[in-house]
Amino acid sequence: MKIAIAGAGGRMGRTLIDAVLADSELSLVAAVDLPKTPALGTQAGPIKITSETQTVAQADVVLDFTRPEGTLALLKHAKAMVIGTTGFTEEDKDRIAEAAKRIPVVMAANFAVGVNTVYKLAETAARILGDAYDVEIIEAHHRHKVDAPSGTALQLGEIVAEALNKKDFVFGRKGVIGERQPKQIGIHAIRGGDIVGEHTVIFAGTGERVEVTVRSQSRATYANGALRAAKFLKGKSPGLYGMADVLGL
Ligand code: NAD
């Protein structure tokens, strides 16, 4: 399978280059990033990182870990796409859904298999524990992350909200805010150092507290999941798929 990596000079891009080069089923045919990035012109296995976005057209699948504007530009050239970028607006998501009528796309705020397991565990816990337990979601990431809360925390919020049929998200708290309302789902973001990614869903009841936590220790976990998604796309019809489809959940 021919693979292109977008955002090749970034943290995820570099991890993906190593993962693709180490996989005998995959060959790296394009690696793109923005003009003026220090990584431009440097070697990515057999090829060089370039700013010529259209070069991704020669790949069977584009792995995109860039920024929303990068994703939208790449959709014009890709035959199939794995979208790992986060921080999309509702309008951006509509444009991705529109493109997915033409090409197959796997989009996930988090490609780590363990995190996707926690999605399922949090949903199950919410259904069993119900409204008697207050839900708070805490995420932590490295100091360079530009969007908050993480796409994964938002996804966890949506999953729990759907399971409990309540959707009053509260992002952080400050001042005299009054008593906690039962409908609330609190979401909190911590930023610091080199934390790769941590997510905890707390279900706080009377007399006990349940916590579901996943800690991602290396970006390789996202890269492995992204490669599974790329292989899943082989021969797929156009459509917008998620990691639940890839993992058969
Ligand atoms: P990064 O800043 O280290 O790398 C991003 C790279 O994309 C940079 O090299 C940058 O120059 C490049 N870029 C930016 N705009 C571009 C454009 N328009 N066209 C081409 N390249 C462009 O960031 P990162 O930590 O590698 O994360 C990248 C994205 O992936 C972020 O949105 C992050 O939240 C997301 N992410 C998702 C997952 C997941 O599992 N879905 C995991 C980790 C990171």
Image (cartoon, rainbow, N blue to C red):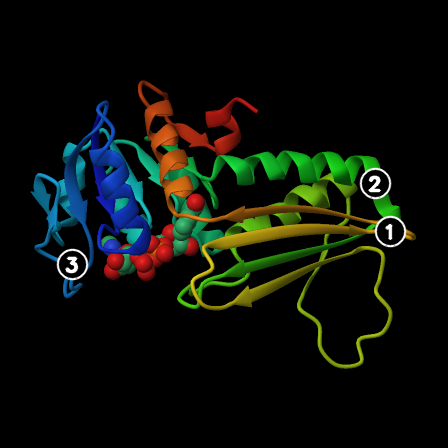
Q: 102 or 206, which is in the foreground?
A: 206
Ligand 1 within 8 Å of the CB at mark 3: yes
Q: Assess disc 3: are there few (<14), some (14-19) or many (≥20) residues with their C-alpha within 10 Å of its C-alpha.
A: many
Neighbourhood count class around disc 1 (C-alpha, 10 Å): few under 14, some 14–19, many 20 upward = some
Q: In the rendered image, which quarter is residue 129 located in?
A: top right
The amino acid type, in three-letter code, at marker 1 is Gly
Rendering coords of residue 246 (x, y %): 46, 26
Left or right: 14 with respect to 154?
left
Residue 76 visible in the displayed image: no
Q: Which residue in the structure is indicated by mark 2?
A: 129
Q: Position of residue 70 (x, y in %)?
A: 29, 53
Residue at figure coordinates x 52%, y 63% from the top left? 148
Upstream in sequence: badge 2 or badge 1? 2
Does 239 appear above or below 18? above
Q: Earlier in the sequence, mark 3 or mark 1?
A: 3
Circle 2: residue type: Leu
Is mark 2 in CB contact (under 8 Å) with mark 1?
yes
Look at the picture and state if 238 lies above or below 129: above
Question: Which residue is painted at 80% across and 80% down in the image?
Answer: 176
Amino acid of disc 3: Ala
Identify the image quadrant of residue 27: top left
Q: Residue furthest bottom?
A: 175
Q: Which quarter holds ligand 1?
A: bottom left
Secondary element at tag 1: loop
Report if the CB atoms under discs 2 and 3 are less than 8 Å apart: no
Q: Residue extending furthest top?
A: 235
Residue placed under numbered mark 1 in the picture: 205
Of residue 91 and residue 226, the one placed in the foreground of this image is 226
